[in-house]
Image: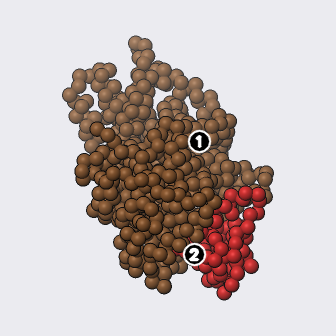
Chain colours: A red, B brown
């Protein structure tokens, strides 16, 4: 399962972040921001139109990202 | 005496700027780094033992693997490879004690630079309130550098850091072997040194975000905030503006009474006092606008607004990231265009730069305010709203909507390309009065020095153009008709008459190139020189309503929604994009839109019978 498929209020553990292009800068940045294997993540809000972008809580920080960006994040143990 | 070169470095939202303000107070210099438009802030401070420190506030960065010009500056200055910037002798790395997981990773990355460093645990008070216990001596041992705690928003919150600066600089900390996982190392250190309650102390954020990020209520709150902001600009500032207005008029009269009749009196009263006075009046409005924007910025709300508006911006081919530079452009397009450097996608950045001048900047406010006051009746609408405020709101909306349309039109090719949003939603914070006051002071100084330099110079120049040559003996009509300015104005009528402008407006548009608000002082100068009565500047408002048709006023208002004339904006676009072509495109399309929209407005007004003399 990928982060863009997680529902509002849902939580999961990050498995890994995959590159969509060679040296994908978005994936690189996601990893720097703490989207690393084993980290719990949950969806705290979704945008007003088309439920895009999403706001996620990870560690002690919240990030807003578009679903297309979230599709790089693979999850396990979704609840 | 020796001066220690130190640099503050840290994640965005680590409270670095508040700490910088606390340490250096008003001894700050804000400029740009050579060659780029990244803001460079340097301050000076003296430690308790009398050591002088030159402190550089580096742009916030998430990583030294830079993805924006901002982060590249931080990386290069830390590495000591930035041209024209001495390598810092000490790195003061600031981390938010409530968000160590993210911030400590960056501190580890900074540690790799192999420079002497001090780690500052900022917002230690908030961490204590959340029940986070940090073993500082242990953290210092594990991290390999001195660690101090700080509270950037408390008056004595920087004491420990000041004392640490007095000690001889620590040896450079040991770096990890290349290719190490900083996240893993941060986790290891945190597991050793930090204990926190199992339930995360995010209850406040949770509750607030439930409202602020709500699909319906979030939008309602956002719209209400923007609306109140523009109402406030109009109604709160009025009493102070009236005072300033009365003050300049009194000054003009007092000075006029002392000086002998002649060219000097005309220069001082009509040129300098009328020119500067008519613009200084708008200081309260500009400060209120900046206060709102600064407060929204400090509170952590702006990224939430970017989140809510992302999809709307996407319809224009942009991302929510463009919202913050565009909001700053309401104050002035120059900082707005500079703020676009946080947009990673180069095409998004270009489009944001192109449409930033369509956001009504505070320099247009004087023109709007004057014309609205002269031509729109003072009335309450629905018993609640001020009609003046409503018209102002409509003008702002017109700018925003045309910006969306322009962005949409520019979004032709490469649709597959991604426009990343990826934005941190920082913790909510009550804006700190000291930081707000400092920000406002900097704005007021910039505005007043503009009045002092550009506006007075231009007013005096215009006065000269409008006074010479003097009319020949026996000439009829006001003297200004014979002057150089009068002639230029009449020539411009060939182009501008079809949009309903008179020659006085044409004259005032030329100095408006230097700064848009100068158009008002120019009108004041043109009309006060044209009038028999020397105190006409204070009566600009009734003069305009007596001389202009409603159609002319509406046409000028429409022109100013697009207002292509602003040298500073064009100059910053040149600097920011390095391309004269972008400057040409911006000026060209703004002029075409201004002319087209004013043309339509004027002709509709003619059809409605608003084109005649009042």
In the picture, measured across the screen, residue B407 lies left or right of residue B331, that is right
Cβ–Cβ under 8 Å for marks 2 and 1: no
> Which residue appears at 42% of the width and 25% of the height?
B461
Q: Residue B67, position in %: x, y?
A: 62, 53
B155 or B303, nearer to the observer? B155
> Which residue appears at 48% of the width and 85% of the height?
B198
Q: In the picture, residue B542 is in which quadrant? A: top left
Q: Which residue is mark 1?
A: B576
Vertical comparison of B133 with B575: above or below:
below
> Which residue appears at 25% of the width and 37% of the height?
B251
SS label for mark 1: helix
> Which residue appears at 37% of the width and 58% of the height?
B19
| Outermost bottom residue | A79
SS label for mark 2: strand
Q: In the picture, residue B183 is in which quadrant? A: bottom right
In the picture, measured across the screen, residue B327 lies left or right of residue B588, that is left
Q: Residue B146, position in %: x, y?
A: 39, 61
* Number of residue marks: 2
Q: Which chain's residue wears label 1?
A: B
B12 or B271, nearer to the observer? B12
Q: Which residue is mark 2?
A: A57
């Amino acid at each position: 399962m990928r982060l863009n498929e997680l529902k509002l209020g849902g939580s999961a553990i990050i498995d890994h972040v995959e590159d969509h292009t060679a040296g994908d800068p978005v994936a690189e940045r996601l990893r720097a921001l703490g989207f690393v294997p084993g980290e719990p993540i949950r969806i705290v809000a979704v945008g007003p139109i088309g439920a895009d972008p999403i706001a996620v809580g990870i560690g002690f920080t919240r990030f807003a990202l578009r679903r297309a960006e979230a599709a790089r994040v693979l999850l396990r143990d979704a609840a | 005496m020796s001066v220690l070169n130190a640099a503050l470095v840290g994640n965005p939202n680590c409270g670095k700027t508040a700490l910088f303000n606390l340490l250096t107070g008003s001894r700050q210099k804000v400029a740009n780094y050579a060659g780029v438009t990244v803001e460079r802030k340097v301050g000076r401070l003296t430690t308790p033992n009398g050591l002088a420190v030159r402190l550089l506030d580096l742009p916030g960065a998430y990583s030294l693997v830079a993805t924006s010009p901002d982060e590249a500056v931080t990386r290069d200055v830390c590495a000591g490879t930035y041209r024209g910037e001495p390598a810092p002798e000490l790195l003061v790395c600031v981390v938010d004690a409530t968000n160590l997981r993210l911030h400590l990773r960056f501190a580890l990355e900074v540690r790799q630079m192999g420079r002497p460093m001090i780690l500052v645990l900022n917002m230690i008070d908030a961490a204590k309130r959340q029940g986070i216990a940090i073993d500082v001596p242990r953290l210092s041992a594990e991290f390999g550098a001195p660690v101090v705690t700080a509270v950037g928003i408390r008056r004595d919150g920087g004491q420990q850091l000041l004392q640490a600066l007095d000690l001889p600089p620590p040896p450079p900390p040991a770096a990890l072997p290349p290719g190490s996982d900083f996240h893993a190392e941060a986790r290891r250190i945190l597991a050793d040194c930090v204990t926190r309650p199992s339930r995360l102390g995010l209850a406040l954020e949770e509750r607030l975000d439930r409202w602020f990020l709500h699909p319906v209520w979030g939008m309602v709150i956002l719209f209400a905030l923007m609306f109140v902001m523009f109402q406030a600009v109009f109604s709160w500032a009025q009493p102070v503006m009236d005072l300033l207005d009365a003050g300049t008029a009194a000054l003009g009269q007092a000075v006029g009474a002392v000086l002998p009749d002649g060219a000097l009196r005309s220069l001082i009263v009509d040129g300098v006092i009328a020119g500067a006075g008519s613009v200084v009046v708008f200081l309260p409005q500009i400060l209120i606008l900046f206060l709102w924007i600064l407060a929204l910025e400090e509170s952590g709300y702006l990224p939430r607004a970017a989140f809510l508006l992302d999809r709307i911006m996407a319809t224009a081919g942009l991302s929510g990231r463009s919202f913050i530079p565009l909001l700053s452009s309401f104050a002035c397009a120059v900082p707005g265009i500079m703020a676009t450097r946080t947009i990673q996608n180069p095409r998004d950045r270009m489009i944001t730069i192109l449409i930033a001048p369509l956001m009504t900047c505070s320099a247009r406010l004087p023109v709007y305010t004057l014309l609205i006051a002269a031509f729109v009746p003072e009335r309450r609408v629905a018993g609640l709203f001020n009609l003046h405020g409503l018209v102002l709101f409509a003008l702002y909306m017109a700018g925003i909507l045309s910006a969306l349309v322009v962005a949409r039109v520019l979004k032709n090719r490469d649709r597959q390309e991604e426009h990343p949003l990826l934005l941190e939603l920082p913790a909510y914070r009550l804006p700190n009065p000291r930081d707000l006051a400092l920000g406002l002071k900097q704005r007021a100084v910039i505005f007043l020095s503009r009045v002092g330099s550009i506006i007075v110079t231009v007013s005096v120049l215009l006065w000269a153009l409008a006074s010479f040559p003097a009319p020949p003996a026996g000439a009829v009509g006001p003297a200004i008709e014979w002057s150089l300015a009068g002639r230029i104005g009449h020539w411009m009528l060939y182009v501008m008459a079809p949009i309903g402008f008179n020659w006085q407006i044409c004259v005032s548009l030329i100095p408006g190139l230097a700064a848009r608000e100068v158009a008002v002082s120019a009108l004041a100068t043109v009309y006060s020189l044209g009038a028999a009565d020397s105190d006409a500047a204070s009566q600009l408002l009734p003069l305009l309503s007596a001389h202009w048709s409603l159609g002319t006023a509406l046409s000028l208002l429409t022109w100013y929604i697009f207002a292509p004339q602003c040298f500073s904006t064009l100059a910053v676009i040149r600097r920011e994009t390095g391309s004269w072509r972008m400057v040409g495109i911006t000026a060209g399309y703004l002029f075409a839109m201004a002319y087209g929209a004013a043309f339509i407005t004027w002709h509709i007004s003619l059809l409605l019978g608003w084109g005649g003399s009042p």
